[in-house]
Image (spheres, rainbow, N blue to C red):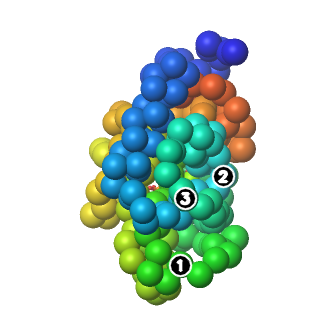
Amino acid sequence: MLQKDARVSEVLITHDQIEKRAVEAAQWIKENYKDREPIMLGILKGCFPWMQEVFKNVEIDCSMEFMTVSSYMGGSKNSGTTKIIMDINTDVTNRDIIILEDIVDSGKTIKKVIEYLNLKNPRSIKIVTFLDKKAGREVELKADWVGFDVPHKFLVGFGLDFDEKFRNLPFVGVLNESEYK
Ligand code: IMP
Ligand code: MG
């Protein structure tokens, strides 16, 4: 497995650390959702590696759904408009939803997703995010479970992309500025 990439200036989170933290996320889900069959709702595409890591460790019944939302349009800053490209395809009335996200930065994407899902009358909505870039926050939003707090830098790997690349890196690192400037 790759341990580094020349375009990444610093590895912040190793694959080992990610695996351990995913087990803890799954444990938290088990403790909080026993007998409630939660819907694990992944926000594509960034959630994909993190969600699979958590999902395989969840020891209660749960289902799996996905939504695709877009807010970046290929750049490195949230453009402010969140578009639903693929909607959730199941009835969530009175169900407990756990949103699985790769990273919360400005908070705008998840805030919009929550506003949208609330129209469908779920029983609860909670956020399990792999990464939390709290210094980037522009709207009030607090994740219910955070894997790792990360600095206000542009990161790639383990689901996080720049121009659709780097999602496959097995670690999280800081992208060299020369790659996007
Ligand atoms: P927010 O709406 O600003 O919170 O942005 C959330 C989305 O932006 C995440 O789901 C990511 O897809 C993307 N994002 C935020 N920060 C980064 C980063 O450092 N690298 C790659 N993608 C990021
Ligand atoms: Mg995302």
State the CA–CA distance, disc 2 to disc 3. Answer: 20 Å
Q: Secondary structure at mark 2?
A: loop
> Of callouts 3 and 1, which one flags the residue occurring earlier in the amino acid sequence?
3
Residue of label 2: 45
Residue of label 3: 62
Q: Can residue 137 be seen?
A: no
- Residue at horizontal 45 percent and vertical 42 percent from the top: 26
> Of callouts 1 and 2, which one flags the residue occurring earlier in the amino acid sequence?
2
Residue type, numbered disc 2:
Lys
**Is disc 3 surrounded by few (<14), some (14 to 19) or many (20+) residues within 10 Å?**
many
Q: Secondary structure at mark 3?
A: loop
- Residue at horizontal 63 percent and vertical 73 percent from the top: 88
Q: Can residue 128 be seen?
A: yes
Viewport quadrant of the N terminus: top right
Residue of label 1: 92
Viewport quadrant of the C terminus: top right
Residue nearest the observer in this picture, 137 or 86: 86
State the CA–CA distance, disc 1 to disc 2. Answer: 21 Å
Q: Is residue 117 left or right of residue 74?
A: left
**Is disc 1 surrounded by few (<14), some (14 to 19) or many (20+) residues within 10 Å?**
some
Tag nearer the camera, 3 or 1: 3
Residue type, numbered disc 3:
Cys
Q: Quadrant of residue 2?
A: top right
State the CA–CA distance, disc 3 to disc 1. Answer: 13 Å
Q: Are marks 3 and 1 in contact (CB under 8 Å)?
A: no
